[in-house]
């Protein structure tokens, strides 16, 4: 028995990865619980594992008294000195060993359940702590089963879940397929640790490049950002901390072997590798590749950029269904509005015309106002005087004049528009509104027809 219990503890400790002290504590608690069920919950029972004997010993604590009122908790002074401790004094608490041979089947079953539960809890805690430290890493697993549209993946020691929203569209798996995924989160639930995987997270792209590119793993090349539309296209920004190392070339690899390995793992997802730079305008231009940018207008307050591209480059800049500009915006963190040169020129013409229509605003002042970001007389009229005073090239006196003129001009314009609308509405109501002249069908001259004569048919034949 001695060797059996010691061997069982040793074996379970190795198989489950649980510390021996946790198993021994579980044994002791289980024996105490079973003993209290058998002898009564009011009794003070303690358990100690004896490795030499290979068993858990049970002891009952009793207080030494002159007169025993509760035999379950007290022992007389005479009995204590005779059977337990010759030097016992009144008030001492002595431990009496209990006989466990009388344990019944129910008590033994309760002890077993307690031990199994404690071992399971300890195992869950170990798995949780192990995977909690692996958040943001890649793991390999085998598809175990399907629950609704979620995939349960066996990671060896435990199962993980690959939710539907974290799966790449058009990727299909069957039972026993191998799958590589990114650990998004590890949560402890009532059913144990829940490990949530993802194949759509941008972090998976970064980790795959880290595995394929030694320069990234060693810290020579740093990944500055990544953006993905899973299954379609992705962009990753890299920078080199060594002037002799080209970050884009390092990620592409000889004949594209490194980037192709990542593309293959992501089932054909196209990847753009962007050379990161601290110059945000240049960074946005690179992120919009393969489109070439003509001009960029930056709005720091709105954290946005208006990107002007040649007319033939607009479709490239925007991409299929806006994919390219959307990924560039996610990668750089800037709001990006891509427009063609002709569209921008038309807007500029309209803006200058609108601003130039304000009384007292000449072409030069209109240009200064336009360069300050105002694109219409209405926008200028809604601005505060302090904002107009900040426009470079316009003095305080001129700014006040422009402020008043723009408001008066826009108010008068709105008044005329409302009058015109009211006039049109009144004409429609009274029936005097001008209407389009009624179109009459064009008369077609009637041509009398008759069946061809024999002479006619003869002429037609000879003509042929």
Image (spheres, rainbow, N blue to C red):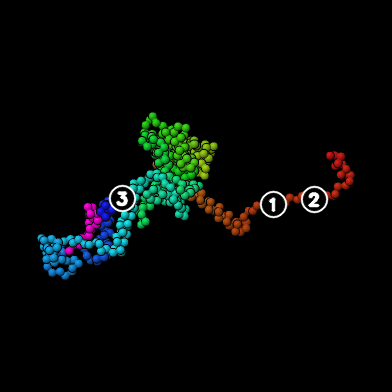
**Going from the N terminus, do you reach mark 3 or mark 2 first?**
3
Q: Is residue 73 left or right of residue 418?
A: left
Please state which of the two labelled residues, at mark 1 or mark 2, is closer to the viewer: 2
Q: Is residue 49 left or right of residue 251?
A: left
How far is the residue under mark 3 from the one under mark 2? 111 Å
Q: Which of the pair 290/390 is nearer the observer?
A: 290
Taking the spot 28% from the left edge, 56% from the top edge, the residue there is 26
> Is residue 49 a member of the stretch shown in magenta?
yes
How far is the residue under mark 3 from the one under mark 1? 100 Å
Please state which of the two labelled residues, at mark 3 or mark 2, is closer to the viewer: 3
Return the residue at label 1: 439
**Going from the N terminus, do you reach mark 3 or mark 1 first?**
3
Q: Is residue 137 above or below residue 243?
A: below
Q: Are marks 1 and 2 in contact (CB under 8 Å)?
A: no
Q: Is residue 409 above or below residue 223?
A: below
Give neighbour class at mark 1: few <14, some 14-19, many 20+ (Cα, 10 Å).
few
- Tell me where the magenta segment starts and ends, as one range: 46-62
């Amino acid at each position: 028995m001695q060797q059996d219990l010691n061997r069982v503890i040793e074996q379970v400790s190795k198989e489950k990865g649980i510390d021996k002290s946790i198993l021994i504590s579980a044994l002791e608690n289980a024996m105490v619980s079973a003993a209290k069920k058998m002898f009564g919950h009011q009794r003070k029972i303690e358990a100690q594992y004896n490795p030499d004997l290979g068993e858990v010993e049970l002891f009952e604590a009793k207080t030494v008294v002159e007169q025993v009122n509760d035999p379950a908790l007290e022992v007389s002074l005479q009995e204590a000195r005779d059977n337990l401790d010759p030097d016992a004094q009144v008030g001492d608490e002595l431990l009496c060993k209990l006989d466990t041979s009388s344990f019944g089947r129910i008590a033994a079953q309760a002890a077993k359940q307690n031990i199994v539960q404690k071992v399971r809890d300890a195992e869950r805690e170990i798995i949780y702590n192990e995977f909690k430290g692996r958040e943001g890493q890649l793991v390999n697993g085998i598809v175990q089963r399907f629950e609704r549209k979620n995939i349960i993946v066996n990671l060896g020691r435990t199962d993980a879940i690959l939710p539907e929203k974290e799966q790449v569209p058009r990727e299909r798996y069957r039972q026993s397929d191998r799958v590589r995924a990114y650990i998004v989160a590890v949560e402890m639930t009532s059913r144990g640790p829940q490990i949530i995987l993802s194949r759509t997270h941008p972090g998976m792209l970064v980790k795959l490049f880290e595995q394929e590119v030694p320069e990234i793993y060693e810290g020579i090349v740093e990944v500055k950002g990544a953006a993905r539309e899973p299954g379609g296209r992705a962009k990753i920004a890299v920078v080199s901390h060594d002037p002799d190392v080209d970050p884009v070339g390092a990620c592409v690899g000889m004949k594209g072997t490194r980037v192709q390995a990542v593309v293959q793992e992501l089932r054909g997802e196209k990847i753009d590798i962007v050379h990161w730079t601290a110059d945000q305008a240049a960074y946005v231009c690179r992120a919009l590749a393969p489109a070439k940018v003509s001009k960029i207008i930056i709005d720091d307050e709105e954290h946005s950029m208006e990107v002007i591209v040649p007319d033939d480059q607009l479709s490239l800049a925007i991409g299929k269904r806006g994919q390219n500009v959307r990924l560039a915006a996610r990668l750089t963190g800037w709001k990006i509005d891509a427009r063609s040169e002709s569209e921008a020129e038309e807007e500029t013409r309209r803006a200058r015309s609108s601003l130039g229509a304000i009384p007292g605003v000449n072409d030069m002042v209109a240009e200064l106002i336009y360069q300050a970001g105002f694109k219409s007389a209405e926008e200028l009229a809604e601005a505060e005087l302090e904002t107009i005073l900040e426009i470079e090239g316009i003095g305080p006196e001129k700014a006040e004049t422009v402020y008043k003129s723009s408001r008066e001009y826009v108010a008068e314009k709105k008044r005329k528009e409302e009058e015109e609308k009211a006039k049109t509405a009144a004409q429609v109501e009274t029936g005097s509104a001008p209407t389009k002249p009624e179109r009459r069908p064009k008369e077609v001259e009637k041509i009398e027809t008759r069946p061809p004569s024999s002479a006619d048919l003869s002429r037609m034949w000879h003509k042929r």
